[in-house]
Amino acid sequence: MNIVKVGIVGCGNISDIYFSNIALFNNIEVYACADIDVGRAEAKADAYGCKALTVDGMLADPDVEVILNLTIPLAHYEVSMAALNAGKHVYSEKSLAVTLEDGEAIIALAKSKGLLVGCAPDTFLGSRPQTMRKMIDDGWIGRPIAATGFMTCHGHEVWHPGPEFYYKKGAGPLYDMGPYYVTALIALLGPAKRVCGMEKISFKERMITSQPLAGKMIDVEVPTHTAGTIEFVNGTIATLITSFDIWDSNLPRLEIYGSEGTISMDEADPLAGPDIFEGVTKYRRRDKADWNGFPTTIPRNEKTPWDGIPSCYDYATNSRGVGLADMARAIREGGRFRANGDMAYHALEIMVGLSRSSESGQYYEVKSTCSLPELLPVDQVEYMMGK
Ligand SMILES: NC(=O)c1ccc[n+]([C@@H]2O[C@H](COP(=O)([O-])OP(=O)(O)OC[C@H]3O[C@@H](n4cnc5c(N)ncnc54)[C@H](O)[C@@H]3O)[C@@H](O)[C@H]2O)c1
């Protein structure tokens, strides 16, 4: 197979998992890395055995086919546009951009140049949401009626080494964690048509407690609590809370309620919802007295003891990068890929819509749409992994 060479721009916290996971796929490889902090790029290049380049050097290098944009959200637009203008495909960490206008410009430039744009999160390709989607498609809970997504915690300043950006434009819980929840809901239910939201800043300042910046105060510039309602085209009404203001709660992370039963991504850990690949799915049908729960880590294609639901999807461990491998397949073979820019733009519009609704006091009608991503079958996974 003709391997797609990837250039990573942004060698911070999240880059390690991409460096490690890209090595698992046989259709992509990290060719080079770059960062405005040259020392960081050199350290990662040493650790993972690739070239360290300047950002300009990477954009000028004809061997780089895809720029993997792992910079902070405020830099996503600038880096993605520069990559596209240099004739490279782009796969970006979330969010696609900080504003709708910037997101639209990225998608339009890519289309005009015949280049692909992919975007995280790809956690919806994890075994748990994939199994949930298969259950919905196969009618296990009947017709979807409602859904909930609850991302409640007290912020990332307790663990991230440089958490200030989480409280600046383009972040906050809605734009940082919201993409996982909104994308999972789209991947389970399809596109949305209107939203309404309310949001606020509960603490004007926050103290960093993680090292090396412990004790430093952060000025909070963005809402840290958003409560919203999303109406999907298929009629499902979802309730979404994303909050960095809640110390603890007993709310489930993500549930889908159907005419015949409920499926739940229920975890005690507040940061263990649709933002991770692993986990347990629980479901309860109207004809059963109790919940059934099954881990999605059991061997694929093995029938579970619970109603014979097959656990047939891979990616039950942290597999960030599977969306990029899927995009690389589309670069070589054509056709659609799952973590695509249209879905990322639609997710961004839903989130921006929640904020605009909060400001205006009106519903926000969502203008964009996207297709329901296809399930990721095991044979395609094996193909990408060279099995
Ligand atoms: N940290 C996580 O656990 C995590 C998880 C999932 C997604 N993400 C997403 O990944 C992205 C990066 O997050 P992070 O935690 O790695 O941040 P980080 O601050 O640790 O790293 C970002 C890196 O990008 C570099 N950078 C910034 N602007 C640049 C530019 N214009 N050109 C080149 N390099 C530039 C910085 O120097 C830094 O090394 C964000 O979009 C975030 O939402 C992070």
Image (tube, rainbow, N blue to C red):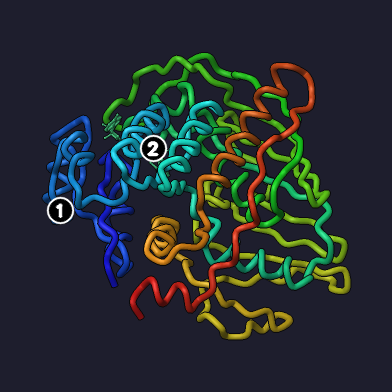
Quadrant of the snapshot with the C terminus: bottom left
Tag 2: amino acid: Trp
Residue type at the position of mark 1:
Cys
Tell me which residue sits at (38%, 37%) in the image.
159
Residue 177 point in image, percent of width and height: 53, 39
Camera-nearest residue between 121 and 148: 121
Measure how far apart labels 1 and 2 are at the Cα level.
Answer: 28 Å
Is the residue indicated by label 1 positioned so its CB lies within 8 Å of ligand 1? Answer: no
**Residue under pointer 1:** 50
Residue in the picture at 73% in, 68% down: 137
Residue 244 placement: quadrant: top right
Q: x, y (%) of residue 269?
A: 55, 50
In screen coordinates, is 355 left or right of 161? right
Residue denoted by label 2: 159
Residue 266 higher or lower than 53, as above or below: below
Of the two numbered discs 1 and 2 in the rendering, the one whose residue sits closer to the viewer: 1
